[in-house]
Image: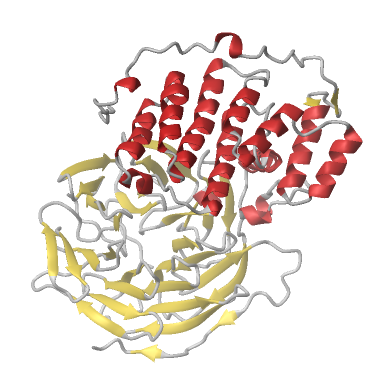
Amino acid sequence: MGGIGDNEPPLKRPKVPLGDSNSFSGDSFLTQSVACSLGDMMARPLPSQGDEETFFSKGVIKRSEFIKIITRALYSLGYDKSGALLEEESGIPLRASVVNLLMQQVRDGKWNESVATLHTIGGLDETTVKSASFLMLEQKFLELVRIDEVTDALDTLRNEIVPLCVNVSRVHELTACIVSPSWSAILGLSSHDTDVARSRSKILEKLQKLLPAAVMIPEKRLEHLVEQALDVQRDACVFHNTLDGDLSLYLDHHCGRRQIPSQTLQVLQAHTDEVWFLEFSHNGKYLASSSKDQSAIIWEVKEDGRVSLKHVLTGHQKPVLMVSWGPGDHQLLTCGLEEVIRRWDVATGECLHIYEKNGVALVSCGWFPDGRGIFSGMTDKSICLWDLDGRELECWKGQHTLRISDMAVTDDGKRIISICREKAILLLDREAKFNRLIEEEEVITSFSLSKDNRLLLVNLTNQEIHLWSIEGDLKVVAKYKGHKRARFVIRSCFGGFEQAFVASGSEDSQVYIWLRGSGELLLALPGHSGAVNCVSWNPTNLHMLASASDDCTIRIWGLDQLSLRDRISQSNDTTHYSNGRT
């Protein structure tokens, strides 16, 4: 592509300078002064276990805790015999006999006995005993109401629950069960025995969360510890780029650079001129590209990772500047260079609608998150929103966009982002009618919005890419350098696991990849014979990257395998052309 002077804007994308109030007054017994101290009812704490036997190489794991956690896991997995055998063989019971007695009393609905047993368990503070007693006495009350034993229920409320002086708002709700029978339905009371059994099981679950772990080991504690260990390994993995399902317990996890796509697996050669833009669909099953040859192409990503041509979309009278996938990946927008927007059916390749406006041309396109409308930047520097049938719904006039400008809309549809001046990006809040500006010292050529809508990659003419945080205060949080950009619009993208990498094209015919967090340059991938204009990372296949170049080709990048025999192919498919006429 021919060059221009350093003081001129980049080609392809030319730029033009520019309290709680629910009380029951009639229930005087609720407001009476009561003595809330449990005093001598509290059992003394268990003696310190600081001298307990430890084992394994570092000596930090207590033997009894380790065995109890394994026993708990066996019972959780349904291996009751194995769990009981481990308790017997090790001589370490999962729970103290008094705790087992408490649990059985709860299952049997022996509420007075269960409260008494609770007070014999050592190591519990007064607040915990009160809260646990409340749970059990509340269940006693509800079960009495369920069988219409109103007098006994009222006695339990007055003489057992209220003196605990906890959860007053809930006490008011329980009182309402007696005052108004309809409240029983609101609280989910019924006469079915199965509901009673289920509710008692829920009480045990609540007690388990309330009582100290040394008394009742939390459910799935071993699973939590293992997952925590995997999380630590994953977070410490500098080049992490694998799905969680690929992690293994057999070995410590470590991703090398080989988990980053760096090997050309396919070269797609269906375009006849420079390829300016490309983007994977949200589900990763398709790739769309647009070219100076006035066409766009939909490619299909097969289950084996091969990419094949699906539709060639023709009908534009000017180079196709960009494409945009609909929310469900069933439709695609293509935008001509200062021309029109076309909406296509992905399954058939047919043009469903053409969007245009008298007196102005369209220069960018995108979808609103609900898929019911599209937006575009116009050559008169306005932003317009249409419904799918082409009726204009909103239009923001003024200095909202350049003649050629990237645009994006956040997933909630509230903010429109566009390049509004050569060195500024506009964040337009549709609801608050409030605008914010990202201002750079160099000319902005393109930007890319992160999947979580919190970060913005901004490409500049000084051969830098800036990462902006757009949540809260606007600020640059990272910078990426190394790629080449002198004359053309070069695009970058997020990618990999949790979008932990940044990839970019470059005028030196290479693809560059950085760590997003640190800005460290990881790879420069040769292969193209012309400027690389755009890159796109497959959102569902972390090991697939695509690049578009002035050499008229698209390269599909994957993992660097030891043997790549028969992997590189030349794709010249011409299946199903559409003229795009309506």
- Quadrant into which the N terminus falls: bottom left
Point out residue 477 in the picture as x, y percentages from the top left corner. 42, 36
Quarter-of-image position of residue 396: bottom left
Q: Does residue 96 appear in this view?
A: no
Residue 328 higher or lower than 214, as above or below:
below
Determine whether 460 is above or below 36 in the image. Answer: below
Is residue 251 visible to us here?
yes
Q: Position of residue 395 (x, y in %)?
A: 12, 60
- Residue drawn at point x = 49 percent, y = 28 percent: 134
Q: Position of residue 529 (x, y in %)?
A: 52, 68
Choose between 536 and 117: the one closer to the eye: 117
**Residue drawn 27% across the image and 66% down it:** 365
19 vs 121, left or right, is left
Question: What's the residue at 43%, 55% (across, down)?
Answer: 492
Left/right of residue 508 with respect to residue 565 in the rendered view:
left
Relative to 293, is 512 above or below? above
The quadrant in which the C terminus is found is bottom left
Report the colour scheme: secondary structure
The residue lying furthest to the top in this view is: 39
243 relative to 314 in the view: left or right: right
Q: Name which residue lies at 42% across and 84% down.
A: 311
In the image, 4 versus 101, the foreground residue is 101
Image position of 561 with respect to 68: above or below? below
Label tally: 0
Picture coordinates of residue 27, whole percent (x, y): 29, 25
Nearer the observer, 238 or 336: 238
- 338 relative position to 295: left or right: left
Viewer-side residue, 206 vs 331: 206
Q: Residue furthest right?
A: 89
